[in-house]
Image (cartoon, rainbow, N blue to C red):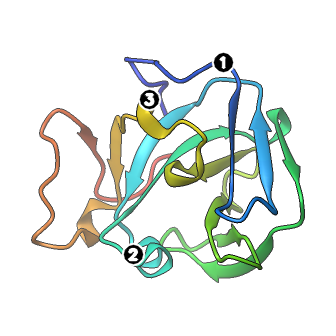
Amino acid sequence: MSAPEDQTMPSTITGGCACGAIRYACSSPPVAMLSCHCRDCQRASGAAFASGIVVHVADTVVIGEPATFVVTGDSGGATTRSFCGTCGSPLFTRGALVPHLMSIRFASLDDASAFKPAVDIWTASAQPWVVMDPGVERHKGGIA
């Protein structure tokens, strides 16, 4: 994964769920900003893809106890999805293949206006009606 070229995220990234039961803060800039088109992300998001920022787990503090659900992702590895058990807001995704990184769902950011995806992944599973930005890097599968 490469760092976003147009890095505009604040130096400390904060956010949380809709009801406020779960909050988080990340003290480092994102490693990547991306949209994932895999079928699992489609199901989990209820949309054509899930978008988020990829950050280092070690730099992220979570306050509250998110609920989790583990599935086998398109990569073949275990994927843990974290969400608020009270309001259902999707929050984080962690893959067993890259345990030092996690994806934070962009909609949970306190300020989502700086989010700009630089990569589309698992585009082989993208819905045929989705229009992707031609200026965004694409991968038919995942990236590590």
Q: Alpha-carbon distance for marks 3 and 1? A: 12 Å
Helix, strand or loop under label 2: helix
Residue at image coords 36%, 39%: 117
Q: Disc 3 vs disc 1: Cβ atoms closer than 8 Å?
A: no
> Residue 39 lies in what quarter of the image?
bottom left
Mark 2 surroundings: few (<14), some (14-19) or many (≥20) residues within 10 A: some
Q: Is residue 125 left or right of residue 116?
A: left
What kind of residue is marked 1? Answer: Ser
Q: Earlier in the sequence, mark 2 or mark 1?
A: 1
Q: Which mark is residue 11?
A: 1
Q: Which residue is farthest right?
A: 64
Q: Alpha-carbon distance for marks 2 and 1? A: 29 Å
Q: Which mark is residue 116?
A: none
Q: Nearer the viewer, residue 136 or 67?
A: 67
What kind of residue is marked 3? Answer: Ala
The quadrant of the image that shows the C terminus is: top right
Helix, strand or loop under label 1: loop
Residue 112 location (% of width, % of height): 48, 39
Residue occupied by mark 2: 42
Examine the rendered structure and indicate whether residue 124 appears above or below residue 9: below
Residue occupied by mark 3: 114
> Residue 116 lies in what quarter of the image?
top left
Residue at image coords 61%, 50%: 104
Q: Nearer the viewer, residue 66 or 125?
A: 66
Examine the rendered structure and indicate whether residue 75 appears above or below residue 139: below
Q: Earlier in the sequence, mark 3 or mark 2?
A: 2
Residue 137 location (% of width, % of height): 26, 37
